[in-house]
Amino acid sequence: MLAACRSGNGGEGAGPTTTARAAGPTLRAADLPGDPFTLGVASGDPLDDAVVLWTRLAPEPFAAGGGMPSGDLEVAWELVDDERDRVLDSGTALAAADLGHSVHVDVRGLEPDRPYRYRFMVGDFETPVARTRTAPAPGSGDRLRLGHVSCQMFDQGYYTAYADLAADDDLDLVVHCGDYIYENPSGGQVRDDSLPVATTIDDYRARYALYRSDADLRAAHALCPWIVTWDDHEVEDNYHGSTPKETSTTPDPEEFAARRAAAYRAWWEHMPVRFDSPDGPDLRIHRSLGWGRLAELVVLDTRQYRSDQVCAEGPADIGPRCDAAADPDFTMLGAEQERWLDERLEEVDAAWTALVQGVAVMQWRFAPGNAAWNLDAWDGYPAARDRFLASLRSSGAPHPVVLTGDVHSSWVGALAEDFDDASARPFGTEHIAPGVTSPAPQILRDVLGAVLDHSPHVRWGEADHRGWVRHDVTPDEWRSEYRLVDDVTVEGSAVTTATRWVTPAGGTVTEA
Ligand code: FE
Ligand code: CA
């Protein structure tokens, strides 16, 4: 139990990842041109004794450097109890100019399975009090209520899904499967995105500022801790590892490496993650977090290390597989992440193995033969997928549930060793979140029926609506509820449960 009123102790046991880099404050609160907390707050990567608290100072969020004067500034943080009049822990962290004045505080020494509240303060400015929580201790915990989101093109719609999610006081955790920002305006007419295509650190910072200008998104971050991964659009559409797509605005490899470095840095600056800031074009984000006896949350990176897609991609990334896709070196996760995953899976000590990652694992067969596969997903990396599925099986990792984004449509499927064999016994489940606003490509809507007809392990698909997925997890069953928004182009549109699914531990996903 944390002692009350430990104010000013610098956060005993806290490991603020930002202070390690900077010498000391060179700015005072009086130097601020206005309220610096325009981007809200967030928390993330909860452990059973720790959670990361985040904010970033940006009094003028769209200006270069967020409108901050040059120099570093000390920011105070407080953990407060539910009544707010009692401070449980507090400290200061340095908002360093070279880290975009972002603040990441790794508060340690907390009690397991407990709600907490927190806020940040600079001078007379303070954030609203936000909620977070710790994970249950190993071997304990009765339930996990999980929000599952992805793909949120700002100009294509309202974040009604986040308003619905943020209204759920019982939510423990949100996982984001990527495409948190899009690097360019997407041509949507619903909300204004007049920012340029992002290639520099200031461009990417401005895009995060645009997305966080949405009050529903900020409310969702203030509700509970998030665990995030990324997909392509945090850098650029359909990049593969260190290779940009053919029509990239930065086709030169060195130019693309500099752009990836800027994009990864801006992502780190805006996400409540526990690792250090990147220094260059690489950032390891794959990691694993336990949630008591309920689940191990294994977070994968399906972008940074993947092989360049050499099979010819047609519209919406769909095309035939070429011989190169069968090459054992043709990788989705990269050799190092694959080895790490193999080891992690051996050690899972919980009822469920939840895999938070970017692109569809389940096979989508559009037609008999080899004419058409979604080459950007695991379908385009068949040898790598065989290894991934074999690893899930041979490790004996308890019931895998894959949580996915990317395709702007909802899908429920079973994991099987042979996706073409209708009698192959499923050993896992995959849920694909519909995306918060990003529209489904027309070609996907056109072929959805054919995919369902030709893919025996795909149980359900829906491409007409956006939304989010709520998962209620107990040691015995994994229940999933697809919350779909009537029309994301209309503010305040109705959100309803479209369908419910249940996977019994060790069993097969069925409609509930
Ligand atoms: Fe997307
Ligand atoms: Ca994507």
Image: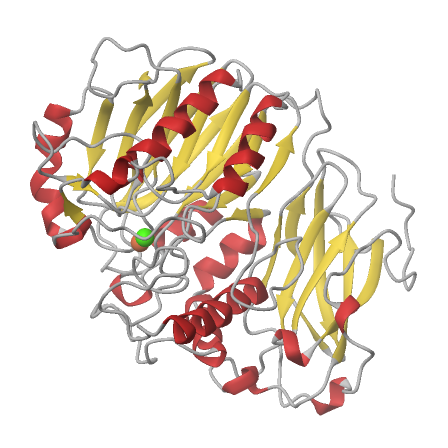
Judged left or right of residue 29, residue 1 is right
x and y, in percent, of residue 467 in the image: 32, 45
Q: How many marks?
A: 0
Picture layout, residue 289 above or below residue 502: below
The image quadrant where one finds the C terminus is top left
- On the question of residue 377 being in view, the answer is yes
Q: Which residue shows up at 22% across the image and 45% down it? A: 465
Picture layout, residue 379 above or below residue 90: above
Task: Give residue 15's quadrant in the image.
Answer: bottom right
x and y, in percent, of residue 311 in the image: 20, 48
- On the question of residue 498 being in view, the answer is no
x and y, in percent, of residue 111 in the image: 79, 37
Task: Give residue 153's quadrant in the image.
Answer: bottom left
How is the structure coloured here? secondary structure
Judged left or right of residue 13, residue 460 is left
The image quadrant where one finds the N terminus is top right
In the image, 125 versus 294, the foreground residue is 294
Q: Which residue shows up at 71% across the image and 66% down it? A: 120
Q: Which residue shows up at 49% across the image and 43% down it? A: 175
x and y, in percent, of residue 379 in the image: 26, 36
In the image, 499 versus 459, the foreground residue is 459
Judged left or right of residue 120, residue 455 is left
